[in-house]
Amino acid sequence: MNKSPIIGWDVGGAHLKAAMLNAEGNLLRVLQVPCALWRGLNELEVAIDEVLSQFSTSAAIHAITMTGELVDLFANRQTGVNEISHVMHAKLAGAKLFYTGASDLDFAGFVTIDEVNAHWQHIASANWLASAGFVAKQVGHALFIDIGSTTSDFVLIAEHQPVCLGLTDAARMQTEELVYTGVIRTPLMALTQKIQFEDTVTSVAAEYFAATADVYRLTDDLVGEDDMTDTADGKEKTVYASTKRLARMIGHDADDKPLDTWVALAQAFKQQQVSRLQEVATKHISRVKNNTKLSIIGAGAGSFIAREIAESMKLPYLDVADLIANSQSSNDCELKHWATVCLPAYAVANLAFHNNQMQ
């Protein structure tokens, strides 16, 4: 049994997330840093350096998962998996394990760098499965909903096993286990073509004038530390700047109306997204013959929406933060919040820890 600390890494297209566990498997640190991977692999290298500057990595084992292979920097996903993996391998000292998803039925398979190319299809965008595998070890029956900055994952869990209709991004998009909508980066034009504004319904501009982060700044749902992505116009993330971007979506200037009017418009956009996600949740819950044992487990920067869905559907709700073990105070809400936002990084570290314990 190796008693080394473990760092879990989740390499996304917009962020790099990392979570560190001590030798006992307790959470020590979590960090999310911007990583505009589509601009080049140097963005990933800089982001890794930022994490390493804040983590004590001596003798650590590194467990790595990703979704960043999808960015248009790469000719195809196989190239993306290989290039990301080789950057991680070159930058990190010590043992490196790349998450492949299912190994028998424990959803905790890992390979070394020499095996990455042979398993690239299982490595590509497998971070959701690490999260679901972690949750399934803790909860017997649930709908796990991870609402992130860009996408939302829906995974049904039964008898402590993820019950997946699809495994690849393409298959999961067909089954709506992967929905391309999130609480920070989604353009508002992707939510609806028409929206209620005051006493009328108006068309929505098919332009990237504003994103969901603008909505959730105005509704006061978004935690500021989660809000790391550039705005649509590259300007401030203040309430007033957000109203300016939101107003453009319906052909207005922010000064045309009082703030309350723009907050109401933000609430209308929020309701469009919540309704869409609740529709998907209802679809997956309907797969369960007897859902009396079912709860909703929420994670991600948009976990507040998962909570609202559970309340609307009158189902028990549990935040994934309550499943996370840490070596500090059980009331360390900030640490657990970050682990929720960066769940795949924590989950892949946790799965690697338990794999390590069995060796």
Image (cartoon, rainbow, N blue to C red):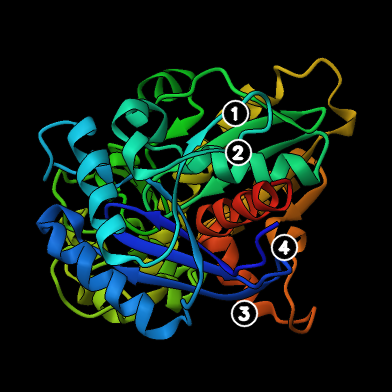
Q: Is residue 321 left or right of residue 165?
A: right
Residue labelled with disc 2: 108
Disc with the residue nearer the chain's start (2 vs 3)? 2
Q: Are marks 1 and 2 in contact (CB under 8 Å)?
A: yes
Q: Are marks 4 and 3 in contact (CB under 8 Å)?
A: no
Cα separation between marks 2 and 4:
17 Å
Cα separation between marks 3 and 1:
33 Å
Cα separation between marks 4 and 3:
12 Å
Dot 1 amino acid type? Ser
Cα separation between marks 1 and 4:
23 Å
Q: Is residue 75 left or right of residue 34?
A: left
Residue shown at the point (55%, 51%) measured from the top left: 348
Residue shown at the point (56%, 43%) measured from the top left: 130
Q: Quadrant of the N terminus?
A: bottom right
Q: Position of residue 149 (x, y in %)?
A: 40, 55
Nearest to the observer: residue 279 or residue 302: 302
Residue 103: mark: 1
Residue labelled with disc 4: 324
Residue labelled with disc 3: 334
Cα separation between marks 1 and 2:
6 Å
Q: Position of residue 175 (x, y in %)?
A: 48, 19
Residue shown at the point (26%, 62%) measured from the top left: 246
Disc with the residue nearer the chain's start (1 vs 2)? 1
Residue 97 in sight from this viewpoint: yes
Dot 3 amino acid type? Glu
Residue 308 in sight from this viewpoint: no
Callout 4 crowding tier (Cα within 10 Å): few <14, some 14–19, many ≥20:
many
Quarter location, residue 108: top right
SS for dot 3: helix
Callout 2 crowding tier (Cα within 10 Å): few <14, some 14–19, many ≥20:
many
